[in-house]
Image: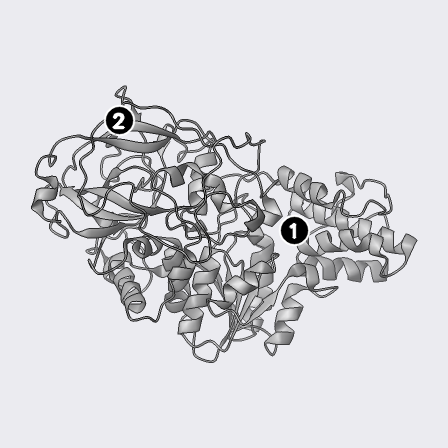
């Protein structure tokens, strides 16, 4: 692809198709749009491949706050080819293969020149809905209305305009679909293991949540020579997936019995894992991860964002006396322009496993419509996608907080007039570049049922997620729906009202707290009536052990023994 690629379109608006979201939570619509030419320091890119991330769903559902702006074009994980550049752009040229990233670096400020972290004092991460330098939009619909950007990328369009600080140049030898994976989630996990934790050979690792980011952490730990990599997830199918990325052991909270997750991990690792990674964004799991880390040298890395804002409660005594450390990680500490080419070389040298992250393939743009792919379990898979970097089974966060993780979001296509869009012959927009051996391509459902109002999705690859309020009311309904019908003969117990949640509880009394407390009470009422080990009580045990952090259960058990339990047992 040489300079002839853009000879007729450079400096001119370009018409193309994009998946447009008109309102929060509404189906995306394929529309014809106009993409302005790049201004100074900007690059116009033809998107060849895009990935679907949990953060896209968070922005899709975001109905309030400064980051909520509609109509907008979503998408922030992609790879493409430079169609044209604006003035002052010297880093890339027309025809270059590039990866746009949400976390940008100017390369000139003190933070960018530092070997520590990946911050940029000149261009910090912002949830602005336009171009970073002036806030304006480069997209217009056919009526001339501005369309908002997402994270400076907006890859759910055949063409997009990004600031040059968002662009990473790739080798022409590198597969486009794999390049897309490196633009966000996979790099986040790899960077967390390599750059933030600096996992050492022979060390032990515990990963809470085996979604795309968690699996990437496992892959990074494997390459660093970790001797034991423990995956924690509610879905046992994740263990088989995790084995491909180095996971050696698996823990499901539903099979821990009376033991907490941290107790089990300590027994497996000689009193605690050297490195613990929380990849979901739940405060309770952050607490479990910290508790599971080894005294004196244990390090806990938080990659997920707590969407509903529950504070993290950690004793200063445990930090000081136990000598543990806990740190957050944005984009895995990755400096995109420096580190992504390093990851790419690892793949080309057959060291890094990227192929396993692609679970679906689908023609471009049609994949952008089916946001439900992020949540769909294997039994409900009816669509394929190009380079989706997420597992095809429901994640730990989804099973905790989503009302119905099998829910299908409707796909709607809006007719548009046929407009010729000139593209390079080597890469037509309809070309499917990625491939997978395990998931066959099948036709998508055209008349999917309309979704009920659902809770906010918790980011699995939450490094780019905006601070929104998650609906934990829906979470309570979710677990009750799952338990109903499990065993028709289960003993009926009085409903525990929310007011019976422990008033002296040192954790915030959220709906999650109340709901797991209710299940805990129901389980012990059932065993008191039916006896220990009664099968009718299994469903209550299953869900309280899934919902309640181990520290809560330990405290309640102690209170039951000394007669100070605050509930109606």
Q: Which residue is mark 2?
A: 140
Q: Are marks 2 and 1 in contact (CB under 8 Å)?
A: no
Q: What secondary structure is marked by label 2? A: strand
Q: Is residue 317 in view?
A: no
Pick the residue in front: 147 or 98. 98
Residue sitting at 78 percent across and 39 percent down? 497
Residue sitting at 13 percent across and 47 percent down? 94
Residue sitting at 22 percent across and 27 percent down? 419
Viewed as shown, does residue 18 lie left or right of 375? left
Q: Is residue 418 above or below residue 278?
A: above
Q: Where in the figure is residue 205, as x and y percent of width and height?
A: 51, 71
Q: Where in the figure is residue 148, as x and y percent of width and height?
A: 32, 31
In this figure, what is the number of numbered marks?
2
Q: Which residue is mark 1?
A: 507
Quarter of the figure with residue 212: bottom left
Q: Where in the figure is residue 420, as x and y percent of width and height?
A: 20, 30
Viewed as shown, does residue 491 lie left or right of 310? right
Q: What secondary structure is marked by label 1? A: loop
Q: Is residue 493 above or below residue 438?
A: above
Quarter of the figure with residue 318: bottom right
Q: CA distance from mark 2 to mark 1?
A: 47 Å
Residue sitting at 48 percent across and 46 percent down? 374
């Amino acid at each position: 692809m040489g300079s002839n690629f853009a000879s007729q379109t450079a400096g001119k608006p370009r018409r193309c198709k994009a998946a447009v979201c008109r309102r929060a939570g509404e189906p995306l619509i394929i529309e014809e749009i106009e993409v302005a030419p790049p201004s100074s320091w900007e690059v116009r890119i033809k998107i060849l491949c895009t990935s679907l991330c949990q953060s896209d769903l968070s922005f899709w559902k975001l109905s309030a706050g400064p980051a909520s702006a509609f109509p907008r074009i979503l998408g922030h994980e992609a790879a493409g080819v430079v169609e044209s550049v604006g003035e002052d752009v010297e880093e890339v040229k027309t025809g270059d293969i590039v990866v746009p990233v949400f976390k940008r670096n100017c390369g000139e400020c003190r933070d960018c020149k530092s070997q520590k972290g990946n911050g940029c004092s000149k261009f910090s991460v912002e949830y602005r809905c336009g171009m970073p330098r002036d806030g304006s939009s480069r997209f217009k619909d056919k009526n001339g209305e501005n369309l908002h950007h997402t994270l400076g990328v907006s890859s759910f369009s055949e063409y997009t305009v990004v600031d040059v600080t968002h662009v990473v140049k790739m080798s022409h030898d590198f597969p486009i679909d794999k390049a897309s994976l490196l633009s966000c989630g996979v790099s986040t996990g790899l960077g967390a293991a390599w750059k933030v934790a600096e996992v050492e050979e022979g060390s032990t690792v515990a990963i809470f949540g085996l979604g795309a980011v968690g699996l990437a952490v496992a892959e990074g730990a494997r390459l660093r020579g970790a001797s034991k990599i423990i995956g924690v997830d509610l879905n046992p199918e994740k263990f088989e997936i995790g084995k491909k990325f180095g996971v050696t052991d698996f823990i499901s909270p539903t099979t821990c019995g009376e033991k907490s997750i941290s107790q089990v991990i300590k027994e497996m690792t000689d009193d605690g894992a050297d490195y613990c990674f929380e990849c979901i964004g739940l405060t309770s799991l952050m607490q479990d991860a910290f508790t599971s880390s080894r005294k004196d040298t244990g390090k806990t890395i938080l990659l997920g964002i707590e969407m509903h804002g529950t504070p993290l409660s950690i004793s200063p005594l445990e930090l000081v006396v136990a000598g543990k450390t806990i740190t957050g990680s944005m984009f895995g500490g990755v400096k995109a322009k420096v580190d992504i080419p390093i990851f790419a070389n690892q793949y080309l040298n057959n060291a890094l496993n990227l192929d396993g992250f692609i679970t679906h393939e689908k023609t471009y743009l049609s994949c952008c419509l089916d946001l439900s792919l992020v949540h769909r379990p294997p039994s409900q898979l009816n669509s394929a996608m190009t380079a989706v970097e997420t597992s095809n089974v429901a994640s730990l966060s989804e099973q905790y907080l989503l009302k119905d993780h099998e829910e299908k979001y409707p796909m709607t296509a809006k007719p548009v007039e046929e407009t010729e869009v000139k593209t390079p012959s080597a890469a037509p927009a309809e070309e499917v570049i990625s491939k997978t051996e395990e998931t066959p391509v099948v036709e998508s459902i055209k008349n999917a049922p309309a979704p009920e109002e659902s809770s906010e999705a918790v980011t699995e690859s939450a490094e780019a997620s905006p601070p929104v309020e998650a609906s934990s009311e829906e979470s309570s309904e979710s677990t009750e729906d799952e338990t109903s019908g499990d065993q028709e003969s289960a003993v009926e117990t009085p409903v525990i009202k929310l007011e019976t949640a422990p008033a002296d509880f040192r954790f915030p009394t959220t709906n999650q707290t109340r709901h797991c407390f209710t299940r805990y009470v129901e389980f012990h009422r059932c065993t008191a009536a039916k006896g220990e080990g009664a099968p009718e009580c299994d469903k209550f045990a299953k869900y309280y052990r899934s919902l309640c952090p181990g520290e809560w259960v330990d405290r309640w058990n102690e209170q039951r023994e000394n007669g100070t339990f605050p509930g109606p047992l």
